[in-house]
Image (spheres, rainbow, N blue to C red):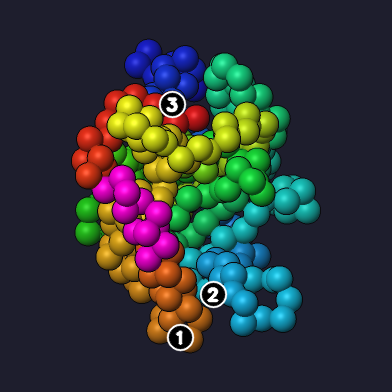
Amino acid sequence: MFSKTVTPSNLCSLLSSKGYAIVDGLFGTSRAMRLRSDIQHLRENNIMFPNATHLHTNQTTSNKPILVEKKNVMEMDVISEVLDVVPNIKALQHDTFLLNALNQFEGIQLKEQRLKVQNNTGGCFPMHVDSDVSIDTRIVSGILYLNPDWKPEHGGELKLYPHPEKPVTIEPIMDRLVLFSSPHMVHRVLPCFSDRYCLTLWFYGNYASYPTLKKPQNEEDILEFLKQRRVRKHLVKLTYADEWAQSIMESHDPSPAREILLQNHWDDVTKLKQYFAPYEKYLPQVSGPVPWI
Ligand SMILES: [Fe+2]
């Protein structure tokens, strides 16, 4: 499955140093086309569900989030009940070559992979990270794109924000796998103008807990503090606050729930501004290698 330029060890090295890795031509066109056909089968038989953003608000009496549906995005967790009608997805579900490759990371043991399939016919996703280490054991996210005729005017690119590096836009072309850090890499899907298919792989495992967060006292400590991987998603929210809000608006039709999503976002930005105010002058200096995984 891997090429001379992308081996399991340099895949891990890229993921760790850049926060993401791209593997083109993962399976070859015919296997990729069969995976696409399986998803089309699920779509045509109305087995998939609309994707929704989870909105946590104190305006509900229970702790359950409100589900704010996205436009034109259908998806489904690959559960055992459907595997027999999608044999190529079933084979991938039981194929652990990627999990084994990622287990070359020192100190991390990935134990399980789960799959989700998606068909996007004109939607997009707001900026987000996939997991939170305090409640979720997803460590690596993988997206396999299955779009043989993709053209720039079709949109639907994946945009990553590997702060402090510049954002990266990745075309969703056929048989391209993109892997990235689930809890630390902010990403979004840009507006899509075509019939776009992809398959998500989530890799679950044990994450070493973060060291205790201590407020830094001197300049050296401040720069180390600002470089931590757990801080990156917050700095992305501060740096790209307007783009983040725009991505929420593009992903959802106007509604009271969308207004709450936007209000929550701006409340977060206000809190983050206050929190990071003492370090503002150091933010442009944040650089250097910090492991993403
Ligand atoms: Fe995501």
Please name which of the two marks, 1 or 3, marks the residue nearer to the observer: 3
Quarter-wise, where is residue 16 in the image?
Answer: top left
Tell me, yes or no, whether the two marked residues, 1 and 2, touch with CB atoms within 8 Å: yes
Where residue 11 appears, as percent x and y from the top left, is 44, 22
Q: Is residue 170 visible?
A: no
Q: Extreme front residue here? A: 217
Image point (32%, 49%), residue name: 278
* Residues shaded magenta: 270-280
Please name which of the two marks, 2 or 3, marks the residue nearer to the observer: 3
Is ligand 1 closer than 8 angstroms to the Cβ of mark 1?
Answer: no
Of residues 167 and 290, the one drawn nearer to the viewer in this rendering? 290
Horizontal side, residue 45 vs residue 242: left or right: right
Horizontal side, residue 3 vs residue 101: left or right: left
Which residue is disc 3 drawn over? 291
Image point (77%, 48%), residue name: 80
Amino acid found under the numbered disc labelled 1: Ser
Local packing at callout 1 (Cα closer than 10 Å; few below 14, some 14-19, many 20+) is: few
Mark 1–mark 2 distance (CA, rounded to whole Å): 9 Å
Which residue is disc 2 drawn over? 68
Amino acid found under the numbered disc labelled 2: Val
Count of numbered badges drawn on the protein: 3
26 to 119, vertically: above or below: above
Of residues 284 and 44, the one drawn nearer to the viewer in this rendering? 284
Mark 2–mark 3 distance (CA, rounded to whole Å): 34 Å
Which residue is disc 1 drawn over? 255
Tell me, yes or no, whether the two marked residues, 2 and 3, touch with CB atoms within 8 Å: no
Local packing at callout 3 (Cα closer than 10 Å; few below 14, some 14-19, many 20+) is: some
Q: Is residue 181 visible?
A: yes
